[in-house]
């Protein structure tokens, strides 16, 4: 399917808004079954903000009452190639020690971002650290980390929408897609 609206011309849709919403409901049920009602949810910003917001409401519908904090990590600059080094742009504020942490990210590509975040939370004394990603680009993975909860397998394309950007644009799209050449 190709969107033809002005602001989203030449974009091929990979996951529709409806498909994502249905998947979020299933993910939330899996998370509650495995982590209980009160995990500490930590979205890895910026790309995960829409996914995390929808997942949080799906978790509410699934009977959970999570706490939330945020961490902002960067490995990309403004380009489309990972620089390979993860930096903390904005850190968490709530105590991590003794908590069951769920890190939420948009994409697992090399795995460096999530591995970095997981090590950081473990080093801060989390009781457990699990990971949830909307998309898993298995072909690009370089670091040995398996997400505990995965929305969709993702083809080896630079994807945009549903919070994900290229050079700070396209985050507003309600679906996930990629720009055609
Ligand atoms: P990793 O550290 O290589 O696993 O990269 C993961 C991070 O890179 C994600 O949190 C995303 O923010 C970003 N990223 C990776 N692939 C894409 C993409 O196709 N579109 C937008 N952002 C991406
Ligand atoms: Mg990210």
Image: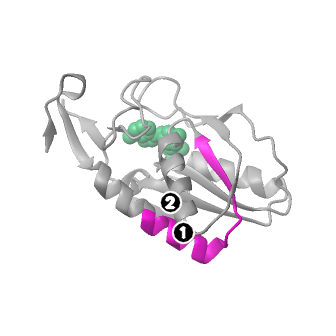
Please name whichever residue, 93 or 122, is drawn nearer the observer in this view of the structure. Answer: 93
**Discs 1, 2 touching: Cβ within 8 Å:** yes
Q: Distance between the residues labelled 1 and 2?
A: 6 Å
What color scheme is it?
one colour
Question: Could you tell me residue 64's position as x and y percent?
Answer: 63, 66
What segment is highlighted magenta in the picture? 25-44
| Residue 89 - label | none
Question: Could you tell me residue 20's position as x and y percent?
Answer: 36, 55
State whether residue 90 is above or below residue 18: above
Q: Is residue 38 left or right of residue 16?
A: right
State whether residue 18 is above or below residue 113: below
Q: In this view, does 79 lie to the left or right of 155?
A: right
**In which quadrant is the C terminus drawn?**
top left
State whether residue 155 is above or below residue 30: above
Question: How many numbered discs, if any?
Answer: 2
Q: Mark 2 points at which residue?
A: 58
Residue 62: say if magenta. no
Question: Could you tell me residue 71's position as x and y percent?
Answer: 68, 40
SS assignment at label 1: loop
Q: Mark 1 points at which residue?
A: 62
x 48%, y 23%: residue = 78
State whether residue 170 is above or below residue 135: above
> Label 2 crowding class (10 Å Cα cut-off): few <14, some 14-19, many 20+?
many
């Amino acid at each position: 399917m190709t969107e033809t609206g002005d602001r989203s011309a030449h974009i091929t849709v990979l996951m529709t808004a409806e498909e994502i919403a249905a998947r979020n409901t299933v993910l939330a049920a899996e998370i509650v079954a495995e982590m209980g009602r009160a995990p500490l949810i930590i979205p890895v910003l910026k790309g995960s903000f829409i996914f995390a917001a929808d997942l949080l409401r799906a978790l509410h519908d699934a009977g959970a009452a999570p706490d939330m904090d945020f961490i902002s990590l960067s490995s990309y600059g403004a380009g489309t190639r990972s620089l390979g080094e993860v930096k903390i742009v904005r850190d968490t504020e709530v105590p991590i020690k003794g908590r069951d942490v769920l890190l939420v990210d948009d994409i697992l590509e090399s795995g460096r971002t999530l591995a970095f975040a997981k090590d950081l939370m473990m080093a801060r004394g989390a009781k457990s650290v699990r990971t949830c990603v909307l998309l898993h680009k298995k072909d690009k993975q370089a670091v040995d980390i398996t997400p505990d909860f995965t929305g969709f397998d993702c083809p080896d394309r630079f994807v945009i929408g549903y919070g994900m950007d290229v050079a700070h644009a396209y985050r507003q799209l309600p679906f996930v897609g990629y720009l055609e050449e």
